[in-house]
């Protein structure tokens, strides 16, 4: 046995190690890139899926936030005016500054003349005030205050112009390819546009990246001391109509029409909490944006059901791995895998894993390796990216060389 081992080592040293040094080297992580641009085309719900009710809006989207699937859509890549839905990005950057300790909720910001003179909806602050960040956030979200949005933008970005650049940089990082910001408040300005798809992306990231600040969206009444108490009511009327609604933001200008992003959370057996979001843009009246949003929320909950395929950190597949300290690679999702299917059709679910082969270590936790393709019968339903649940380090030199030899023979 000793002679065999020595011979094998000699063979490896002489003929394999030089070329295998390149094969065994750890691959560099590919740089992150923004999502590819999506053409602004007419998009509708596929005919083989449940059809949504008639909706009196220029464009709309229904998304199951638990499964991250779009359930219904109309023209979601068409450019539209943003109105005060712009303030969601302003909030995102403010929350990021809070998370990174650049500012605090109790810190006060001055009110510039520019902020004080903002037209449209306001929280009615003035240059004599020093307003805490916490109150400015409430004024921006609950009262949709353009003055509050400007004060926050100047406080976080130094100037409005620099903050707008921050907004556009963040939009690019989030893959919001159809969005361009010109101001932090949403007043009509040439080139200040977005899409329903981008707004859904931003809303999803707000909730997933900053869950600790989600409570602001559900505040029904607020006004800052010294300002008119008559201006204290959240413009999202669904908060008062539907107890499961907990957000998110309204918007209105003459160019944009009446807009609303609404979120609701309802509990279901075997799945727990299920969250649905609607993006309704360009309705004719304030009442219409509420009615159409409520209609779509209810439809999303009744036309579809959520099915849990795999639990949190449960592997969806465990393929063999080469040149690693472990023999298998655990692929799944840290939050679990849930899919939305038409009500009553769970028995038709089919799944298929598409992944590279062979899988050669190392692999880091969270690295995407393959996709779980979910279909309903013969119709593709959704693709779920699979990530590494537990890291696999490279094996030693001999282990890598032995696996390289096995791969060559294979």
Image: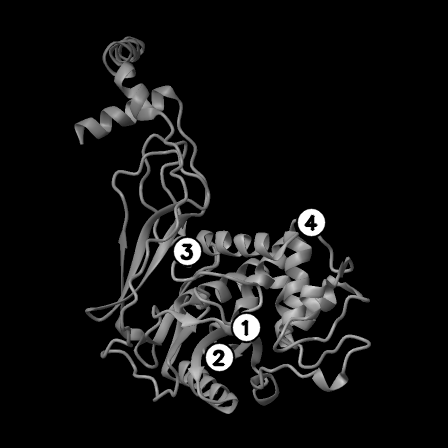
- Disc 4 crowd rating (10 Å Cα; few below 14, some 14-19, many 20+) is few
Cα separation, mark 1 vs mark 4, equals 25 Å
Mark carried by residue 92 = none
Pick the front one: 230 or 22: 230
Instruction: Please tell me which of labels 1 and 4 falls first in the chain.
Output: 1
Quickly name the residue at label 1.
Answer: 84
Quickly name the residue at label 4.
Answer: 102
- Disc 3 crowd rating (10 Å Cα; few below 14, some 14-19, many 20+) is some
- Mark 1: secondary structure: helix
Mark carried by residue 259 = 2
Cα separation, mark 2 vs mark 4, equals 32 Å
Q: Pointers 2 and 1 in contact (CB under 8 A)?
A: yes
| Residue 76 image position (x, y, % from top left) | 35, 71
Say whether residue 13 is visible: yes
Pick the front one: 158 or 285: 158
Instruction: Please tell me which of labels 2 and 1 falls first in the chain.
Output: 1
């Amino acid at each position: 046995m000793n002679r065999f081992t020595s011979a094998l080592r000699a063979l490896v040293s002489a003929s394999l190690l030089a070329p295998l040094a390149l094969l065994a080297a750890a691959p560099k992580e590919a740089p992150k890139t923004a999502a590819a641009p999506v053409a602004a085309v007419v998009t509708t719900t596929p005919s083989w899926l449940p059809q949504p009710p008639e909706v009196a809006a220029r464009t709309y989207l229904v998304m199951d936030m638990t499964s991250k699937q779009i359930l219904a859509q109309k023209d979601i890549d068409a450019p539209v005016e943003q109105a005060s839905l712009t303030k969601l990005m302003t909030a995102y950057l403010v929350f990021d500054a809070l998370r990174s300790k650049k500012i605090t909720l109790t810190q006060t910001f001055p009110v510039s003349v520019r902020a004080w003179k903002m037209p449209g909806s306001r929280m009615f602050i003035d240059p004599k005030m020093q307003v805490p960040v916490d109150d400015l956030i409430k004024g921006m979200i609950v009262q949709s205050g353009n003055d509050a949005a400007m004060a926050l933008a100047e406080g976080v970005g130094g100037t409005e112009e620099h903050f707008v650049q921050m907004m556009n940089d963040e939009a690019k990082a989030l893959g919001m390819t159809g969005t361009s910001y010109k101001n932090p408040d949403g007043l009509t300005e040439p080139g200040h546009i977005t899409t329903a798809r981008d707004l859904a992306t931003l809303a999803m990231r707000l909730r997933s990246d900053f869950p600790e600040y989600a409570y602001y969206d559900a505040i029904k009444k607020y006004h800052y001391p010294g300002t008119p108490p008559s201006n204290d009511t959240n413009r999202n009327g669904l908060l008062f109509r539907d107890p499961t609604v907990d957000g998110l933001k309204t918007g209105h200008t003459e160019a944009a029409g009446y807009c609303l992003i609404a979120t609701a959370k309802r509990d279901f057996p075997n799945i727990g909490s299920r969250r649905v979001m609607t993006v309704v843009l360009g309705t004719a009246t304030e009442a219409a944006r509420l009615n159409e949003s409520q209609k779509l929320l209810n439809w999303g909950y009744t036309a579809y059901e959520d099915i849990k395929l795999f639990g949190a950190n449960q592997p969806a597949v465990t393929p063999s791995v080469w040149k690693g300290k472990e023999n298998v690679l655990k692929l799944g999702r840290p939050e679990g895998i849930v899919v939305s299917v038409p009500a009553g059709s769970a028995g038709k679910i089919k799944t298929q894993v598409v992944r590279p082969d062979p899988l050669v270590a190392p692999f880091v936790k969270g690295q995407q390796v393959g996709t779980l393709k979910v279909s309903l019968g013969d119709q593709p339903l959704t693709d779920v990216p699979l990530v590494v649940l537990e890291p696999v380090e490279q094996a030693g030199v001999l282990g890598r060389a032995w696996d390289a030899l096995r791969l060559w023979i294979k």
